[in-house]
């Protein structure tokens, strides 16, 4: 029996319904958004790299009060750089000066300087291990081997981030369960760790197949993906999931400011369509699953079924590509149903139970 588009090695390992992962959104993380994405069948993520161990424990408890589904906690393996310990308020003000006028024009508050405070990565991860969080994702390097071994012993899924094929190979050698192929389109920062960020700027659509070709673990595409067209493209290149962040910031459950959400809700933006799709289902009596992750009955989506099932290369549960000697159907760009993906946002994909 052929596999459905949303069924592969990674969705099975993570225990999720759809191969969609919410980007951790460092600095803009929200427990409510993390739980909402997980309740809808994706994998919600929370960026905890700046939190103390005590705060991390509180965050985990709150997320678990909102969902019984799997979710990920995301950390930076290294938060150190040459200037981290020496940067002072004068350096902060110099960096802020070029954008201060734009911040003022928006009526937003001026960012305040906060002295650097070092938090030990091993202490942060200890909380994750003790709490047996379902998924541990990370950037800026590879955790010590003893941490990865303890994750395996406790059945915690590990997801590392690569910005180059070499980083993807290093992560697989370390024994991670999945690799995020993070193209230069990814927002916020580069998670590079083998070479400098400026030397690790491969685009997502180029990076994904390069990493897929050299690793055996599932690959997650990240960077510049914000609608169903991007999902289809990533899966066609061999990825077994996508990771999207910015598209979620328009949602009220995100940690973004009102000004930020309003900007993203511009009528032509993809984030606006995602937020609009969520609220439309809520008004129609098909709300987000309540706390505890109780799911409602699914409804079919014939558009997506046609576009994915008739045009996607059959998937092999062992690799994520097609079966040996199979041929992928041609004419993707000429397929009329493919263009219908332009109107299907992420939350519309994840918020429906049947495809």
Image (cartoon, rainbow, N blue to C red):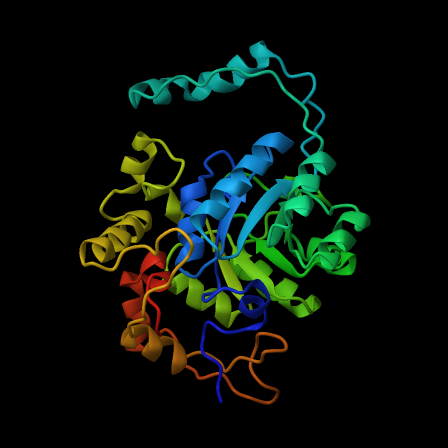
Provide residue 187's location: percent of width, then percent of height.
49, 43
Q: What residue lies at 67% left-to-right and 66% top-to-bottom? A: 217
Q: Does residue 111 lie above or below 302 as drawn?
A: above
Please state the total of marks drawn on the protein image. Answer: 0
Can the viewer see residue 291 in this picture? Answer: yes
Residue ranking furthest to the left: 284
Residue ranking furthest to the top: 90
Quarter of the image that includes the C terminus? bottom left
Q: What residue lies at 39% left-to-right and 54% top-to-bottom? A: 226
Provide residue 113's location: percent of width, then percent of height.
52, 15
Q: What residue lies at 57% left-to-right and 77% top-to-bottom? A: 321
From the viewer's perspective, is 154 left or right of 350?
right
Which residue is more in the foreground, 198 or 61?
61
Provide residue 163's location: percent of width, then percent of height.
63, 50
From the viewer's perspective, is 105 left or right of 137?
left
Provide residue 59's location: percent of width, then percent of height.
52, 38
Q: Residue 103 lies in what quarter of the image? A: top left
Can the viewer see residue 331 in this picture? Answer: no
Q: Residue 190 lies in what quarter of the image? A: top right
Which residue is more in the foreground, 250 or 153?
153
Q: What residue lies at 21% left-to-right and 55% top-to-bottom? A: 280
Q: Does residue 115 lie above or below 326 as drawn?
A: above
């Amino acid at each position: 029996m052929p596999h459905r588009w949303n069924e592969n090695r990674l969705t099975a390992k993570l225990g999720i319904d759809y191969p969609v992962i919410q980007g951790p959104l460092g600095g803009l993380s929200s427990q409510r958004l993390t739980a909402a994405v997980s309740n809808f069948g994706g994998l919600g993520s929370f960026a905890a790299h700046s939190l103390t161990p005590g705060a991390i424990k509180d965050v985990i408890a709150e997320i678990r009060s909102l969902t019984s589904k799997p979710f990920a906690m995301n950390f930076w393996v290294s938060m150190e750089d040459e200037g981290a310990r020496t940067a002072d308020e004068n350096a902060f003000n110099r960096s802020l000066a070029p954008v201060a006028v734009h911040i003022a024009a928006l009526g937003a508050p001026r960012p305040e300087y906060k002295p650097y405070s070092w938090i030990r990565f091993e202490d942060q991860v200890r909380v994750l291990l003790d709490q047996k969080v379902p998924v541990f994702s990370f950037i800026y390097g590879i955790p010590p081997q003893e941490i990865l071994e303890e994750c395996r012993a406790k059945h915690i899924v590990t997801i590392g981030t690569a910005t180059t094929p070499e980083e993807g190979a290093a992560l697989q050698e370390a024994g991670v369960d999945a690799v995020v192929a993070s193209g230069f389109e990814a927002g916020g920062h580069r998670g590079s760790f083998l070479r400098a960020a400026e030397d690790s700027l491969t685009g997502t659509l180029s990076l994904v197949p390069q990493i897929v070709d050299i690793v055996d673990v599932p690959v997650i595409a990240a960077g510049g993906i914000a609608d169903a067209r991007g999902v289809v493209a990533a899966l066609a290149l061999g990825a077994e999931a996508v990771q999207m962040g910015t598209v979620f910031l328009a949602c009220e459950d995100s940690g973004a400011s009102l000004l930020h959400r309003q900007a993203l809700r511009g009528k032509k933006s993809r984030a606006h369509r995602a937020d609009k799709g969520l609220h439309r289902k809520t008004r129609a009596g098909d709300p987000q699953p309540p706390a505890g992750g109780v799911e409602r009955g699914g409804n079919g989506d014939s558009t997506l079924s046609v576009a994915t099932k008739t045009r996607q290369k059959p998937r092999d549960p062992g690799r994520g590509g097609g079966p040996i000697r199979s041929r992928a159907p041609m004419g993707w760009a000429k397929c009329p149903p493919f263009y219908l993906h332009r109107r299907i946002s992420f939350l519309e994909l994840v918020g429906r139970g049947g495809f």
